[in-house]
Amino acid sequence: MSRAKKVTTSKKKVPSPVKSLANVSEDNRWRARDDLRTLQTALEIKADKSRINAAQKEAQSQIQALSKVKETK
Protein backbone atom coordinates (compact mmCIF):
# COMPACT_ATOMS: atom_id res chain seq x y z
CA MET A 1 0.00 0.00 0.00
CA SER A 2 1.40 3.40 -0.97
CA ARG A 3 1.26 6.34 1.32
CA ALA A 4 -0.25 9.59 0.06
CA LYS A 5 2.10 12.52 0.10
CA LYS A 6 1.13 15.42 2.30
CA VAL A 7 0.60 18.50 0.18
CA THR A 8 1.83 21.69 1.71
CA THR A 9 1.22 25.17 0.46
CA SER A 10 3.45 28.14 0.82
CA LYS A 11 2.13 30.57 3.38
CA LYS A 12 3.45 33.90 2.25
CA LYS A 13 2.51 36.88 4.33
CA VAL A 14 0.69 39.44 2.28
CA PRO A 15 1.29 42.91 3.63
CA SER A 16 -1.89 44.77 4.48
CA PRO A 17 -2.23 48.13 2.83
CA VAL A 18 -1.41 50.80 5.37
CA LYS A 19 -2.26 54.36 4.55
CA SER A 20 0.05 57.05 5.69
CA LEU A 21 -1.38 60.01 7.54
CA ALA A 22 -0.79 62.11 4.44
CA ASN A 23 -2.90 59.73 2.34
CA VAL A 24 -5.70 59.68 4.92
CA SER A 25 -5.65 63.47 5.07
CA GLU A 26 -5.79 63.71 1.27
CA ASP A 27 -8.67 61.20 1.16
CA ASN A 28 -10.58 63.27 3.71
CA ARG A 29 -10.01 66.46 1.70
CA TRP A 30 -11.17 64.74 -1.49
CA ARG A 31 -14.31 63.47 0.28
CA ALA A 32 -15.05 66.93 1.68
CA ARG A 33 -14.73 68.49 -1.78
CA ASP A 34 -16.97 65.83 -3.29
CA ASP A 35 -19.54 66.31 -0.51
CA LEU A 36 -19.48 70.06 -1.12
CA ARG A 37 -20.17 69.54 -4.84
CA THR A 38 -23.04 67.21 -3.95
CA LEU A 39 -24.57 69.75 -1.58
CA GLN A 40 -24.18 72.54 -4.13
CA THR A 41 -25.93 70.42 -6.76
CA ALA A 42 -28.73 69.58 -4.32
CA LEU A 43 -29.29 73.28 -3.64
CA GLU A 44 -29.41 74.01 -7.37
CA ILE A 45 -31.98 71.25 -7.89
CA LYS A 46 -34.11 72.43 -4.95
CA ALA A 47 -34.16 75.96 -6.38
CA ASP A 48 -35.30 74.75 -9.82
CA LYS A 49 -38.97 73.78 -9.64
CA SER A 50 -38.94 71.79 -12.89
CA ARG A 51 -35.89 69.76 -11.79
CA ILE A 52 -37.35 68.97 -8.36
CA ASN A 53 -40.65 67.94 -9.97
CA ALA A 54 -38.83 65.70 -12.45
CA ALA A 55 -36.81 64.14 -9.61
CA GLN A 56 -39.96 63.48 -7.58
CA LYS A 57 -41.66 61.93 -10.61
CA GLU A 58 -38.62 59.67 -11.18
CA ALA A 59 -38.63 58.69 -7.50
CA GLN A 60 -42.28 57.65 -7.73
CA SER A 61 -41.56 55.64 -10.86
CA GLN A 62 -38.74 53.77 -9.13
CA ILE A 63 -40.87 53.16 -6.03
CA GLN A 64 -43.52 51.55 -8.25
CA ALA A 65 -40.92 49.40 -9.99
CA LEU A 66 -39.49 48.26 -6.66
CA SER A 67 -42.94 47.42 -5.32
CA LYS A 68 -43.44 45.08 -8.29
CA VAL A 69 -40.21 43.29 -7.42
CA LYS A 70 -41.37 42.91 -3.82
CA GLU A 71 -44.74 41.47 -4.97
CA THR A 72 -43.05 38.67 -6.92
CA LYS A 73 -41.68 37.03 -3.78
Image: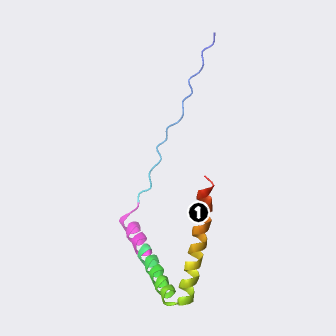
- Residue 37: x percent and y percent? 47, 81
Q: In this view, does 54 lie to the left or right of 12?
A: right
Most frequent secondary structure within the magenta stretch: helix
Q: In this view, does 18 lie to the left or right of 12?
A: left
The colour scheme applied to this rendered structure is: rainbow
Residue holding disc 1: 67
Count neighbours of disc 1 (C-alpha within 10 A) and say few if under 14, some if 14 to 19, many if 20 or more.
Answer: few
Position of residue 35 relative to residue 72, above or below, is below
Q: Give the secondary structure at mark 1.
A: helix
Image quarter for residue 68?
bottom right
- Residue 19: x percent and y percent? 41, 61
Which residue is painted at 52% across and 36% down in the image?
10
Tell me which segment is drawn in magenta: 19-30
Going by the picture, which residue comes out furthest to the left?
21
Q: In this view, does 22 lie to the left or right of 51?
A: left
Q: Which of 34 and 1 is in front in this view?
A: 34
Position of residue 36 relative to residue 18, above or below, is below
Which residue is painted at 49% across and 87% down in the image?
44
Going by the picture, which residue comes out furthest to the top?
1
Q: Nearer the viewer, residue 16 or 34?
A: 34
Position of residue 10 relative to residue 34, above or below, is above
Amino acid type for the residue under numbered disc 1: Ser
Going by the picture, which residue comes out furthest to the front?
71
Q: Is residue 11 on the magenta stretch? A: no
